[in-house]
Image (spheres, rainbow, N blue to C red):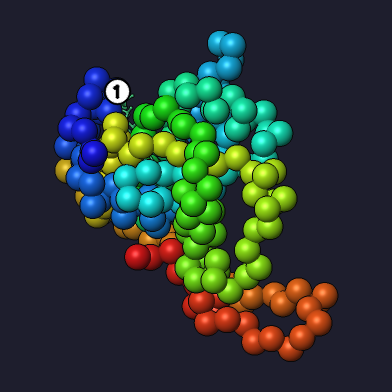
Amino acid sequence: MTIRSITSRTKPSRLAKRGNYDETQIYQILDEGLFCHIAYTEEGQPMMIPTGYGRIGNKLYIHGSVGSHFMRCLADGRTVCLAVSLLDGLVLARSAFHHSVNYRSVILFAAGTVVTDEQERWDALEAFTDHILPGRWAAVRQPTASEMQKTMVISFPIEEASAKMRSGDPSDDEEDYDLTVWAGVLPLEVLPLPAITDPKMRFDTAIPDNVQHYSRKK
Ligand SMILES: Cc1cc2nc3c(=O)[nH]c(=O)nc-3n(C[C@H](O)[C@H](O)[C@H](O)COP(=O)(O)OP(=O)(O)OC[C@H]3O[C@@H](n4cnc5c(N)ncnc54)[C@H](O)[C@@H]3O)c2cc1C
């Protein structure tokens, strides 16, 4: 199953031309994003929780403690609205009105399923760990049976999803191009600062390459 074309829930009412339902584009944004925000309702109360995720094919996986209120809520298969936003730049226009941002974002509507198959749970946790830092799963101690027991994994099908994006220069009103105020784009990117080795390290292990040269860009 792939991305469904526009549904009543995934059609933007404003600037619909920025909307996009291309699977490759949607997957690319999900893979570059680090965290998502998941919105749901609990007894009529809107809730929103930021959390990590991993993707395998057309499934997005989240994980958490079996005791987590959030995970227990989503375990019943209610529909959630999940968002991932990448901020690419500040669009600084000549007028306050036309200030904007360059961005790529995805919104997904889906019902979760608690994953019970042990291999799928394992693969999901590997995808989750490697989503944070590619290659990390193979480098670290993997979960024990007891840690697996304490962990709930929920999968969401990536089917009813939309991407939306803006790029490029400010779009000012014609008469405002006569203003002398500086206008343009300030590009923004997630970039690492130098890594800080844990002072409790018992060995003089070198900082791995994938940590030193960390980048979210795919
Ligand atoms: C970092 C960031 C900052 C933003 N700042 C502003 C701001 O200050 N003011 C502002 O008006 N807008 C802002 N936007 C754009 C905003 O997300 C909406 O796209 C916009 O407000 C238009 O919403 P709408 O009424 O068309 O959406 P609706 O008609 O309410 O949305 C209907 C459906 O369209 C799709 N959709 C709408 N927006 C997005 C999106 N961003 N990504 C993926 N799918 C989407 C979804 O499937 C959604 O369910 C920002 C976006 C990002 C990522």
From this viewpoint, is residue 179 visible? Answer: no
From this viewpoint, is residue 152 visible? Answer: yes
Q: Position of residue 29 (x, y in %)?
A: 34, 51
Relative to the observer, which residue lies in front, 141 or 11?
141
Is 209 above or below relative to 98? below
Q: Position of residue 70 (x, y in %)?
A: 62, 30
Apparent side of residue 15 relative to residue 210 in the rendered image (left or right): left
Relative to the observer, which residue lies in front, 130 or 82?
130
Q: Position of residue 43 (x, y in %)?
A: 59, 11
Q: Position of residue 58 (x, y in %)?
A: 32, 45
Relative to the observer, which residue lies in front, 208 or 174?
208
Quadrant assignment, res 47: top right
Q: Residue at x 61, y 77 (%)?
A: 194
Near mark 1 (Cα within 10 A), the count class, few <14, some 14-19 or many ≥20, is few
Task: Give, as a three-letter code, the residue at label 1.
Answer: Arg
Apparent side of residue 148 relative to residue 107 in the rendered image (left or right): right
- The answer as to whether callout 1 falls within 8 Å of ligand 1 is yes
Relative to the observer, which residue lies in front, 77 or 44?
77
Residue where numbered disc 1 is placed: 9
Q: Residue at x 41, y 50 (%)?
A: 55
Apparent side of residue 107 relative to residue 44 in the rendered image (left or right): left
In this figure, what is the number of numbered marks? 1
> Which secondary structure, mark 1?
loop
Quadrant assignment, res 184: bottom left
Q: Residue at x 66, y 68 (%)?
A: 141
Quadrant where the C terminus sits is bottom left
Classify the position of ligand 1 by quadrant: top left, top right, bottom left or bottom right.
top left
Quadrant where the N terminus sits is top left
Q: Residue at x 51, y 59 (%)?
A: 126
Is 102 above or below relative to 155? below
